[in-house]
Image (cartoon, helix red, strand yellow):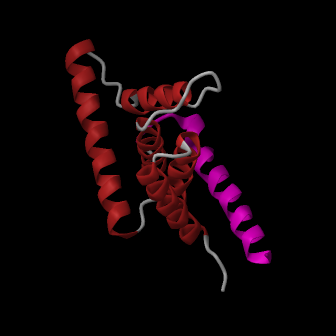
Amino acid sequence: MTLTVAELGVTFLVLFGIFHYLMIFAKTRAVLAFLGAVAVGLTGTVGRIAGNLALWSQHAVGSVTAWAFGSALSAALFIALAVLLAHDLHPRRNASARTGYLALATGILLVAGVSQIPALAPAVNGIRNLLSGLAGFANTL
């Protein structure tokens, strides 16, 4: 039996759920949630719903920033989530229960492409290549 990247992503998401239920490994939960969201992507019913929510939130944040500041910055949500995630994962900071959800939302927004930051376009492929290598390693065991 071979392990695909999507199956590895589902495994990561299941481990995230188990660790969240047990309230252990907060930083590991965040990494598993982020990698699981990127690996699964927008496939399946849950992925399509998550992608639609990401697009809706992008439009909502763009509308609010256009109303408040006169210029639409639809990447504001992704930037805020990424900064909060980096803050929670900092070595001097203890991760909380929200860290896993921040990582999950950041991964979904990154895969959905709603960040609208051109420099992040190759990031998803790089992470998927990393996961492909990890799945290939797991298949050799």
**Depicted 80 relative to depicted 25: above or below:** above
User: In the picture, residue 77 is in which quadrant?
Assistant: top left
Residue at screen point 50% across, 32% down: 85
Quadrant into which the C terminus falls: bottom right
**Depicted 57 relative to depicted 10: above or below:** above
User: In the picture, residue 67 is in which quadrant?
Assistant: top left
For this view, does 20 lie left or right of residue 39? left
Residue 117 in the image: state x and y as whole percent.
50, 34
Residue furthest toward the left? Answer: 67
Residue 115 belongs to the span the image colors magenta = yes
Residue 59 in the image: state x and y as whole percent.
26, 37
Residue at screen point 47% across, 63% down: 14
For this view, does 116 lie left or right of residue 70? right
User: In the picture, residue 8 is in which quadrant?
Assistant: bottom right
For this view, does 86 lie left or right of residue 53? right
Residue at screen point 66% across, 59% down: 131
Residue at screen point 55% across, 71% down: 7
Question: What are the residue bounds of the magenta stretch?
Answer: 114-141
> Dominant secondary structure of the magenta stretch?
helix
**Depicted 97 relative to depicted 51: above or below:** above
Total residue callouts = 0
Residue furthest toward the bottom? Answer: 1
Residue 12 in the image: state x and y as whole percent.
54, 60
Residue 120 belongs to the span the image colors magenta = yes
Using the image as rendered, state which of residue 99 and residue 22 is in the foreground. Answer: 22
Using the image as rendered, state which of residue 84 and residue 92 is in the foreground. Answer: 92
